[in-house]
Amino acid sequence: MIKVFGGNTCKKIAQQLNVTLQNCLVFSICSDERLSTSLDQYLQNIEKKNIPSSLIIIGDFPSLRPAPSESPASYEAIRMIQKSAELKGTIRVCWLDGELVRSSNSLPVMHWNNFNFEQVPCGENRAATLTNASESLNHDNKKAYEHLCNLLKFNIYIGVEEEKIISIDLTDNQAYQRGLGIGLSIGQQKNVWAALLELKSLKKIRASFNDLSFIPNLTILHQLEELDIRGNPDIDLTELSSALSLKKLNISACNLDSIPNEVETLENLTTLLAYKNTIEDISNIKFSRYLKRLSLYRNQIENADINLGHCHSLKEINLGANPILHMNLKISPKINKLKLRARHIGNSILDSFHGDTVIVTSKE
């Protein structure tokens, strides 16, 4: 039988499938490359008799067969089925771009990929420079690290320099990341953040997919340059304004309907990733003048004008998959070359005030 995990797009495909294709699992990739909770649980407990022979995966795929690094959720699903099947057999996989399915009355051409279970990528650690050993840490950092590991019940991956922790990953550091803080109470989250704030040399925090409710005041972390908190829906970002040293910020897939005003206080910001939210209007946001990369992919932006004329270092902006019909993008005449990513919106974006700037438009 055909089993469906997803909304109307998945159901539409299931209804149009050939009646002979019965042993099939149809599912969609959620925001920011996540498996839905129900599908994740199903795959963790799937029985051998229910192993599908075919998968149809609906998502945001720029290619017919995305690489594991481009679609970790897809390969995690295959890996979980592989484990349940005890490495026996072959599975057919077809990736479909959800946007193409929704815009047509008929199914797109289906390109099948055959995977022998023994050949499916298993997802090794993504950040090879990180370690989960504490032997090289000084006394204070080692104490704080061991306390954090105890709180999260996991040997946390860290980056070390001169006996101090300079980066920390609050996920399991796999190709398909799972947050270590899922299910923590507010009190437990406060304890985790308190322990993190003991690490005064931190330059980077990855706290994605942790179901966090808030971030604390980060003033004490004077060297913090990167903060990745994507995939934490409804997180309170009021204290962002305290992270004055931030250069890179990822607030994607956080269910945001606007860019937090606190972003305006981050004067050193060079990278802002806010893709896959529900942001509608960015006309009142004054971005950092040092901004180099801005991603607002797949939001609900309809602005007629966006003025980035003060961002003299801008290298790339992604406005793809927004409901833009006509937009005037104003950029600095000091920019020599700008990459404009505009997937699914064709020629809806105009550019102005760019002097001799070379605009490289990508539909991916």
Image (cartoon, rainbow, N blue to C red):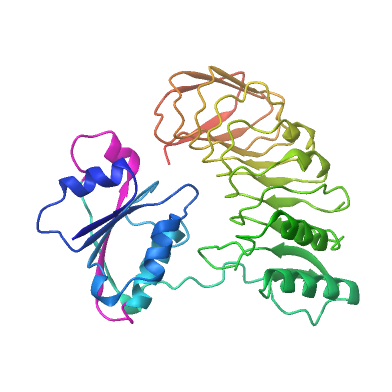
Q: How many marks?
A: 0
Q: Is residue 164 visible?
A: yes
- In the image, 177: left or right of 156? left
Residue 101 part of the magenta-drawn span: yes
Q: Position of residue 77 (x, y in %)?
A: 39, 64
Query: Residue 6 versus residue 246: which sits nearer the camera?
Result: 6
The residue positioned 55% from the left and 44% from the top of the image is: 253
The answer to which image quadrant residue 330 occupies is top right
Q: Position of residue 112 (x, y in %)?
A: 23, 59
In the displayed structure, 322 sits above or below 171; it is: above
- In the image, 98: left or right of 184? left
The answer to which image quadrant residue 141 occupies is bottom right
Q: Position of residue 337 (x, y in %)?
A: 59, 34
The residue positioned 75% from the left and 61% from the top of the image is: 192
The residue positioned 32% from the left and 81% from the top of the image is: 87
Q: Quadrant of the N terminus?
A: bottom left
The magenta span reads: 85-108
Query: Residue 132 versus residue 325: which sits nearer the camera?
Result: 132
Q: Quadrant of the C terminus?
A: top left
The residue positioned 47% from the left and 53% from the top of the image is: 33
Residue located farthest toward the left when viewing the structure as drawn: 20
Q: Is residue 163 visible?
A: no
Residue 319 part of the magenta-drawn span: no
Query: Residue 172 versus residue 283: which sits nearer the camera?
Result: 172
In the displayed structure, 304 sits above or below 337; it is: above
- In the image, 36: left or right of 250? left
Q: Position of residue 47 (x, y in %)?
A: 30, 74
Query: Residue 42 versus residue 105: which sits nearer the camera?
Result: 42
